[in-house]
Amino acid sequence: MADIEKCSVTTEDADASLERTSNLNQSKGDTHASAAEEESVGRESVPQEVADKPQLSKNQVKKQRKRQEWEDARGIRKAVRKEKRVKTRERKRSAIRNGEVSAESFTKPHVQSELVPITVLIDCQFEHEMTPAELVSMGSQLTRCYADHRKAPYRTHLAVSSFDGVLKARFEGILNNQHKSWDVKFRQHHFVDVAAEASEWMRGPKGGTVPASMQDNESPSTLKDSETLDDNVPAGEVVYLTSDSPNTLQVLKPYSTYIIGGIVDKNRHKGICYQRACDHNTKTARLPIGEYIKLSSRHVMATNHVHEIMLKWLEYRDWGKAFMAVIPQRKGGALKEPTVPGDDPDSSATVAEEGHEDGFREAER
């Protein structure tokens, strides 16, 4: 009898244990189902573009935070610059009142600038070939081009083609649309279309005048162009400057457009400007750097340096002086000794070979 009762109790305990286990499993199942349902609802509530957005690395997050901190401090930097200007102005006024200096010593001499019917066109179609940092550098180079353009004794028409995308957004956003007050023609069109437009504005009422020194110019150009337009005005030429060109630019011709590749690529995309020019049947030429200058470092030049060299040539009418006035001293540039024809039968060949092998990508930086 006792054994029967014991068996009955054992069976009841087993049934109770099974029931508790079943209830526990059911509770866990309900919990998992609820979690899965919440996760599904959460996924549905997140926009698709956010869900598909790749996760940023720690490095990218750090850069993004620094960029945001820089933007947040923009007002503070502006106030500091303004305070410095006020202090500088007060120091000058105090020095003049005390008779330490004259007022004329603080006055910059006014440079009479003459507009020449030549167009320098910066081709900015290489946005997809540059990193974000290189695009920022390209924007700074455009700013320097305008600064050199303003103070040049002989200034050309300055234009920018393919001005769109990130570069345009940077000028309109971070740089507060300051470029709209510049004496620079910004165009979204391709350089071929802008070059055609340049031919019209150079012959317009505000096209500029040809200096007397250029009217008497008899220096032969490697790029022959004998065409003329109405009233015996030379047709000029459209030339893309690139070191990969077999032609050497000897002089700047009136009513011509010279295109500089607006790209900062650390020499990754070799020959890209030359290829783009050839694709559109545009003449090409390289600056005669190898004929005048010896450099002790890499022969890479920024876009604004190429533009400044052309302005200096208009001022000096001498490539050697133009190069030495612009090329940074850290490159160790030195003028080559002039050679007398006949002294070295291989001299001209050596110069041409050096100029080609140096790979001076002046128009592609």
Image (tube, rainbow, N blue to C red):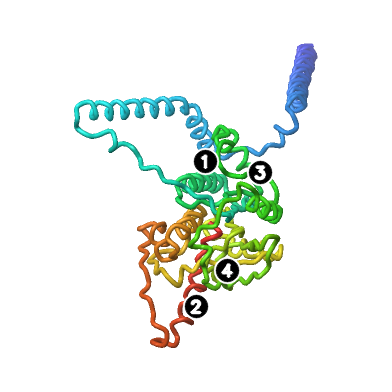
- Give the residue number, with chain letter if any, for mark 3: 164
Q: Residues within 10 Å of mark 2 (few under 14, many from 20)?
A: few
Name the residue located 41 percent from the left edge and 59 percent from the top edge. 327
Instruction: Using the numbered discs, state the Cα–Cα distance from disc 2 to disc 4 in whole angstroms.
Output: 12 Å
Q: Is residue 334 left or right of residue 200?
A: left
Q: Of the two numbered discs 3 and 1 on the same chain, state the one appearing first in sequence.
A: 1
Q: Of the two numbered discs 4 and 1 on the same chain, state the one appearing first in sequence.
A: 1
Q: Is residue 89 left or right of residue 42?
A: left
Q: Of the two numbered discs 2 and 4 on the same chain, state the one appearing first in sequence.
A: 4
Position in image of residue 272 (x %, y %): 62, 62
Name the residue located 45 percent from the left edge and 86 percent from the top edge. 346
In this view, 305 is above or below 25: below
In this view, 109 is above or below 245: above
Q: Which mark is residue 353?
A: 2
Mark 2 lies on a secondary structure that is: helix
Give amino acid for label 4.
Answer: Asp
Q: Is residue 339 left or right of residue 123?
A: left
